[in-house]
Amino acid sequence: MEDRWQHKGHPRGQCLVSPCERFAMVSISKNSSSYWEVWLEQLDWTIQHHRHIPQAATVLVPLRDPVDRWVAGISEYCFLYHNDFPLRNSVTVRLFEDRVVFDDHTECQCYFYDCFDANNHVYFNSNDPQSTWTYLQQHMSIPTQSYLLDPINYTEDPVNADRKRWKNWILSVIDLNKIKQFYQQYDAQTYAHLEELNDR
């Protein structure tokens, strides 16, 4: 499959590999990717591509509710590429609802992880990093310093005021059922994995 977003954003198959090369954390934009990159690089994990990780590595996949992720992602898209343009209008609403995917922030999550060996995936909810840390602490010598759990890049941060304005506008005008229908069709794998996580 062509890597649609390699020229900007997260390329397909990007991951962080542990020093022991037994684990690879998939980088999926808007799924705590900044959080994991900041802390895992401090623990000597390195950014790699799926073609360069050991075949036996366990692939850790942080997932997020697709609609929740889309709202955050399309807000980021508007902020990054159209912040100075009068985009808040009915034409934009129809365009967003019809097309849905505009960049790596709104791409289906399965696009980023289905290029890895399917036999050794472990899925996590990206809204619950503690469960991922617990898993890593059980399988590796990961320190338990509380600083590793600090949040990064929250929308509520004052420096993200423009993103917050876009998010509020999107929540007020977009029919999120149309967004959900799109992802239920094209990112059904992610919904299935999230359902399994919720049943645990």
Image (cartoon, helix red, strand yellow):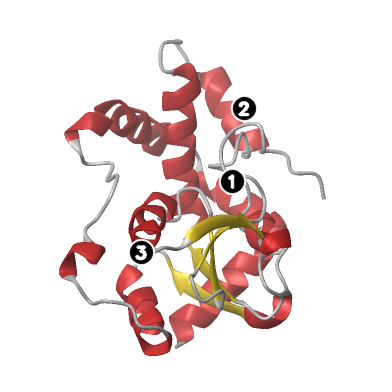
The C terminus appears in which quarter of the rendering? bottom left
Label 1–label 3 contact, CB within 8 A: no
Q: Position of residue 90 (x, y in %)?
A: 52, 20
Horizontal and vertical percent position of residue 174: 48, 36
Q: Amino acid at mark 3?
A: Asn
Q: Badge 1 local density, few (<14 within 10 Å), some, or many (20+)?
A: some
Q: CA distance from mark 2 to mark 3?
A: 29 Å
Q: Image check: 164 left or right of 17?
A: left
Disc nearest the viewer among 1 and 3: 3
Secondary structure beneath disc 3?
loop
- Pointer 1 and pointer 2: residues touching (CB < 8 Å)? no
Three-letter amino acid code of the residue under disc 1: Lys
Q: CA distance from mark 1 to mark 2?
A: 12 Å
In the rendered image, residue 186, in percent from the top left (x then y), is placed at: 71, 55
Q: Which mark is residue 127?
A: 3
| In this view, 139 is above or below 129 | below
Q: Residue at x 61, y 39 (%)?
A: 100
Identify which residue, 94 or 19, lies in the foreground.
Answer: 19
Q: Quadrant of residue 198?
A: bottom left
- Residue at 50% from the left image edge and 64% from the top image edge: 63
Task: Give the CA separation, mark 1 to mark 3.
Answer: 23 Å
Q: How many numbered marks does the figure carry?
A: 3
Q: Which residue is mark 1?
A: 178
Residue 182, percent from left and from top: 65, 50
Mark with earlier residue (1, 3): 3
Q: Which mark is residue 21?
A: none
Q: Earlier in the sequence, mark 1 or mark 2?
A: 2
What kind of element bears circle 1? helix
Three-letter amino acid code of the residue under disc 2: Leu
